[in-house]
């Protein structure tokens, strides 16, 4: 069970210090939004490059951008150890995943709430992680969508049926109130933005989330 706090809810004027607050996490989740694929704009390549130089934990880049075929490999080159692109935006997901892996990064495939896993199930051997969005991507602080739980279950089953070691990440509305449901459905990597950065004791919150998830491990 891994915790990947999203710096979207961090203080953008103090990102190095904010990364320091999550040094006990497994990853630092960095949300890249281009104002086209999602109706919000955050940060891009130069900032990820700078974060990669100072972060105490590996960077888990979540690209909510159009044309990831063109832009995603540069994030691996910039130092992101995991690069997740959206299925809805990729023209050639297999080619892109292979390119990311060839650069030494983990390749992640993300699905918005209304995107089914079934058309991608046979591509699972090509990726290291599936990200099942549990909110509509674009903003932090939204409520966890319980309607996505059956898809998390089907994704875990599809991974198991194929005997694969693919991680299943959930992102959006993950908190002490919802993480157990997500873990129970089969998630094993948990993104949490407001839940971690909104807490006074980020490390304590990370430990609490990890503990709650572990009691529902598969
Ligand atoms: C939403 C982003 C999330 C976001 C999660 O589009 O992908 O990573 O930061 O924030 P919370 O945990 O507050 O829902
Ligand atoms: Zn994200």
Image (cartoon, rainbow, N blue to C red):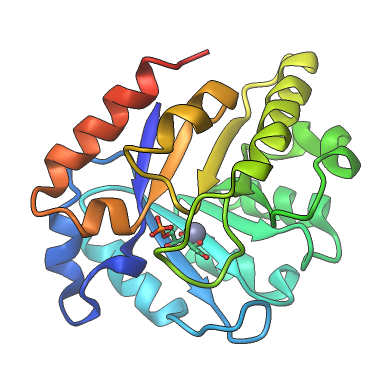
Q: Relative to the observer, which residue lies in front, 138 or 5?
A: 138
- Residue at the spot x=30%, y=29% of the render? 210
Query: Residue 180, image x and y in percent?
Result: 43, 27
Task: Assign the N terminus to one quadrant of the image.
Answer: top left
Q: Up-down: is 192 above or below 71?
A: above
Is 27 left or right of 167, judged from the image as shown? left
Q: Relative to the observer, which residue lies in front, 161 or 71?
A: 161
Query: Residue 139, image x and y in percent?
Result: 48, 71
- Residue at the spot x=13%, y=56% of the render? 20
Q: How many marks?
A: 0
- Residue at the spot x=36%, y=58% of the render? 6
Q: Up-down: is 163 above or below 2?
A: above
Query: Residue 37, image x and y in percent?
Result: 68, 78
Q: Quadrant of residue 207?
A: top left
Q: Quadrant of residue 10?
A: bottom left
Query: Residue 54, image x and y in percent?
Result: 21, 63
Is 213 left or right of 120, judged from the image as shown? left
Q: Up-down: is 207 above or below 161?
A: below
Q: Relative to the observer, which residue lies in front, 70 or 9?
A: 9
Q: Up-down: is 140 above or below 5?
A: below
- Residue at the spot x=74%, y=20% of the render? 157
């Amino acid at each position: 069970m891994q915790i990947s706090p999203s710096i979207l809810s961090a203080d953008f004027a103090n990102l190095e210090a904010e990364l320091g607050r999550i040094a006990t996490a497994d990853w630092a989740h960095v949300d890249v939004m281009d104002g086209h694929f999602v109706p919000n704009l955050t940060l891009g390549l130069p900032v990820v490059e700078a974060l990669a130089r100072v972060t105490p934990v590996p960077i888990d880049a979540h690209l909510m951008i159009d044309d990831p075929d063109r832009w995603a490999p540069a994030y691996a080159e910039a130092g992101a150890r995991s690069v997740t692109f959206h299925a809805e935006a990729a023209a050639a997901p297999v080619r892109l995943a292979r390119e990311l892996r060839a650069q030494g990064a983990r390749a992640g495939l993300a699905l918005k709430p209304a995107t089914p896993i079934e058309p991608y199930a046979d591509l699972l051997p090509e990726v290291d992680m599936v990200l099942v969005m549990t909110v509509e991507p674009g903003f932090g602080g939204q409520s966890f969508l319980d309607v996505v739980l059956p898809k998390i279950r089907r994704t875990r089953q599809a991974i198991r049926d194929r005997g694969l070691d693919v991680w299943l990440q959930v992102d959006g509305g993950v908190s002490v109130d919802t993480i157990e449901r997500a873990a129970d459905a089969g998630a094993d990597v948990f993104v949490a933005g407001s839940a971690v950065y909104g807490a006074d004791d980020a490390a304590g919150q990370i430990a609490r989330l990890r503990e709650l998830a572990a009691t529902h491990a598969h």
